[in-house]
Amino acid sequence: MWRRKYIWSKKKINMITDKISKDKFLLIAGPCAIEGEDIAIKIAEQLVSITSKLSLPLVFKGSYRKANRTRLDSFTGIGDLKALKILKKINSEFNIPVITDIHGKDEAKSAAEYVDILQIPAFLARQTDLLVNAAKTGKTVNIKKGQFMSAGSMKYAVDKVKQSGNNNVMLTERGTQFGYNDLIVDFRGISKLKRLAPTILDVTHSIQKPNQSAGITGGSPEHIESIARAGIVNNVDGIFLETHTNPSEAKSDGSNMLDIKNLEKLLSNLLELREASSKL
């Protein structure tokens, strides 16, 4: 098993941007959902190998439950406790922080026992009780910008966390609704978000095509690198992407995932771009 030292202090993940040099960025990556222990461990092992080689800070991402599926028969998870224990195992065995989504206020405390960062899904970015309960755990809270919200309006979501006594907050841009079945990233909003909190660009959700007539979200993974490059040039603090050893067989969001075999090349390209842009 890979095991490495944290690039930042585990107890101070809120200092994330202070620990990243101007030519680096944070990577939040993993499968959309925890599908089982073997595949989660395999993905984590490859992520640690790649990011250690490139000296990139890594947070492993995996949803322990998918609560916002379009169809009733869509995959939602393998069981809450089972999935949370897998996340905790990845945290322990690879010595990397882990992040997961929560969907209801009562989930905050229980999920916080297993993960380092609690993520608020974009659809729920205005849910006061959810934000407050997440804040009260003392964990870092990553709030995804609602597809229906402006960058400036995210100030109030950040305020809800901070006014609840927790300054450990990040924001994630994941695209804005564009018509009924598409998303677009308005890069003018990145600088506005960065004035509020450390800002991550969720590349793979930004190229989704939601609300398809078949009830299964589509995507355009061929645009992953171009969106990521634009984020790097706009000085985002981190890149978020979902990756899998076989996206076509992924049980959730496979149509917009990055095949992990292409990850090292992508990250290398982004690092070169970051280094070049940091000199301008």
Image: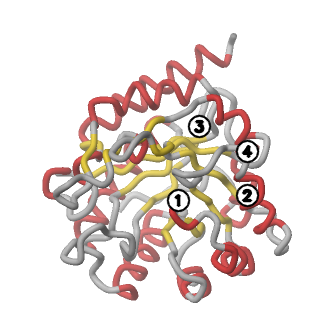
- Front label number (2 vs 4): 4
For the residues labelled 3 and 4, say whether their Cβ atoms are less than 8 Å apart: no
Task: Give the residue pinned by disc 3.
Answer: 25
Numbered label attached to residue 14: 2
Q: Is residue 37 left or right of residue 158?
A: left
For the view shown, which residue lies furthest in the front direction? 179
What amino acid type is highlighted by mark number 1? Ala
Q: CA distance from mark 3 to mark 4?
A: 23 Å
What amino acid type is highlighted by mark number 2? Asn
Residue 86: image location, x then y, percent: 37, 77
- The mark that comes first in sequence, 1 or 3, is 3
Q: CA distance from mark 1 to mark 3?
A: 22 Å
Q: Residues within 10 Å of mark 1 (few under 14, many from 20)?
A: some
- Front label number (1 vs 3): 1
* Residue in the foreground of this view, choosing between 63 and 1: 63
Q: Is residue 73 left or right of residue 177?
A: left
Q: Residues within 10 Å of mark 2 (few under 14, many from 20)?
A: many
For the view shown, which residue lies furthest in the top direction? 280
For the residues labelled 2 and 3, say whether their Cβ atoms are less than 8 Å apart: no
What amino acid type is highlighted by mark number 3? Phe
What amino acid type is highlighted by mark number 4? Gly
Q: Residue at x 48, y 25 (%)?
A: 229
Task: Give the residue pinned by disc 4.
Answer: 152
For the residues labelled 1 and 2, say whether their Cβ atoms are less than 8 Å apart: no
Q: CA distance from mark 4 to mark 1?
A: 15 Å
Q: Residue at x 71, y 66 (%)?
A: 11
Task: Give the residue pinned by disc 1.
Answer: 122
Q: Is residue 123 above or below residue 269?
A: below
Q: Quadrant of the C terminus?
A: top right
